[in-house]
């Protein structure tokens, strides 16, 4: 499982943008990274969050 650190920029006149800033496989490390991003960010229209990403299940066909 991977935890993604997502940066969201909220614009007034257009759609919000999202960007993957970093990732971690450990939730504690991801939380530490998130706090770091939040501490250094000075703009009011920027926010950070964590998204848990799991690989999708892939079904394969058997070859006859």
Image (spheres, rainbow, N blue to C red):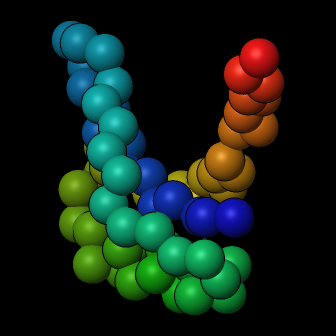
**Rendered location of residue 48, percent (x, y):** 45, 57
In the image, residue 30 above or below residue 50: below
Seen in the image, is 5 located left or right of residue 21? right
Does residue 61 appear in this view? no
Image location (x, y in percent) of residue 5 = 46, 61
Image quadrant occupied by the C terminus = top right
Which residue lies at the image location 46% right of the left edge and 69% below the top edge?
Answer: 23
Spot occupied by residue 21 in the image (x, y as percentages of width and height):
32, 60
Image vertical order of residue 23 relative to residue 63, above or below: below
Residue located at (30% from left, 31% from top): 17
Q: Quadrant of the N terminus?
A: bottom right
Q: Is residue 2 above or below residue 46?
A: below
Q: Quadrant of residue 62?
A: top right
List x then y, in percent, for residue 29.
57, 88
Residue for point 25% across, 19% down? 12
- 16 left or right of 4? left
Query: Splitting the image into 4 quarters, where does residue 42 fall?
Result: bottom left
Residue 17 visible from this viewpoint? yes
Nearest the viewer among 17 and 14 is 17
Task: In the displayed orientation, state which residue is furthest to the front.
Answer: 64
How many marks overall?
0
């Amino acid at each position: 499982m991977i935890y993604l650190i997502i940066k969201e920029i909220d614009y007034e006149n257009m759609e919000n943008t999202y960007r993957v800033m970093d990732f971690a496989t450990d939730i504690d490390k991801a939380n530490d990274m998130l706090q770091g991003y939040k501490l250094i960010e000075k703009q009011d229209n920027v926010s950070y969050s964590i998204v848990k990403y799991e690989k999708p299940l892939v079904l394969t066909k058997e070859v006859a």
